Amino acid sequence: MSEFAANFHLLRPWGLLLLLPAAALWWFVRNAGDTTRRWRSVIDPDLLKFLVVGRGERRIAPHDVLLLASLVVVVAVAGPTWRRLPSPFGEQVPPAMFVLRVTPSMTTTDLAPTRLDRARQKIADVLKARDGLSSGLIAYSGSAHLVLPPTADPSVVTGMAGALSPAIMPREGDDLADAVKLAARTLEDGGQGGSIVVVADTVAPGEAERLRGAADGVPVTFLATAPPQAVAADTNLAASVSALGARLVSTTVDGEDVATIARRLAQAPGAPVPGSAERWQEAGYWLTPLIALMALLWFRRGWVLPA
């Protein structure tokens, strides 16, 4: 009962406007069926009531049934409902874009075997936790490059990430801002929403200012692939994370970092799927038997009620 009271509404409230023609039809049929109306102008009213058969009787006439049936039909047309229908599309998890820093500093061995190898491992672990959901890859150093748009095949993403090294990057440097913009643009072109995961060990000085607004509202998670003490002392990294409005996740050995990122990605907002809007179970059809019964009663002359 509480669900009914809290959620009851009409899917087509404009249908209640049909009450106006229903009332007009009842009034017309009622007056047309008044057999004494034409005699009132020629016979004295005090005398007429004694000449009418069935005087003093209260009667439910067919036009009264018509009015009641019209009310029920109008309510059915208005679409009463109070129960939600589950979406046929199920839960939609948007894609993720991994932005991987590929610079000489990522070959440092303070995270065995190297920071870059550890980054690849973490990306593979996150992809496994996402269980085949779409993910893409961008590599950057002094320039940003789309390696792979979002795909549901994690082996392709890990294979591409494994082939990246500083030696093949066309320009040295640290252009994280352009990489984030490219990731946001790729997600926008896909039209499914999504989020960005930056995987880097540090950020170049002065990059924080360029990062403001670079994600264009897309949620960003920053996985720092450097030892915890280096991450804590890196003011450029902290400023960049703040400029992006990102969640900073430090690399761990127990998989907590992977679980945190996977949760964040699962909660990222996605673009609405056509036809996936909230749907309600219409209850108007339950009134059909009542309407049919009233239609049958229309063929009776009426009922006489006791005085």
Image (cartoon, helix red, strand yellow):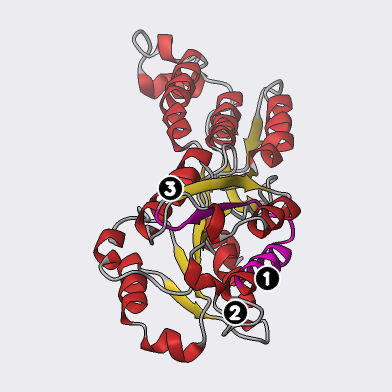
Query: Cα distance, mark 1 to mark 2?
Result: 12 Å
Q: Residue 147 at what x, y percent from top left?
A: 57, 47
The spot of residue 256 in percent (x, y) is 63, 83
| Residue underneath mark 3 | 182
- Mark nearest the camera among 1 and 2 is 1
Instruction: Identify the residue at image location x=67%, y=39%.
Output: 287
* The one of 244 and 123 positioned closer to us in this rendering: 123
Q: Is residue 153 visible?
A: yes
Look at the picture and state if 285 lies above or below 242: above
Amino acid identity at mark 2: Asp
Mark drawn on residue 188: none
- Residue wearing tag 1: 121
Labels 1 and 2 touching (C-beta < 8 A):
no
x 71%, y 54%: residue: 159
Q: Nearer the viewer, residue 132 or 18?
A: 132
Res 98 seen here: no
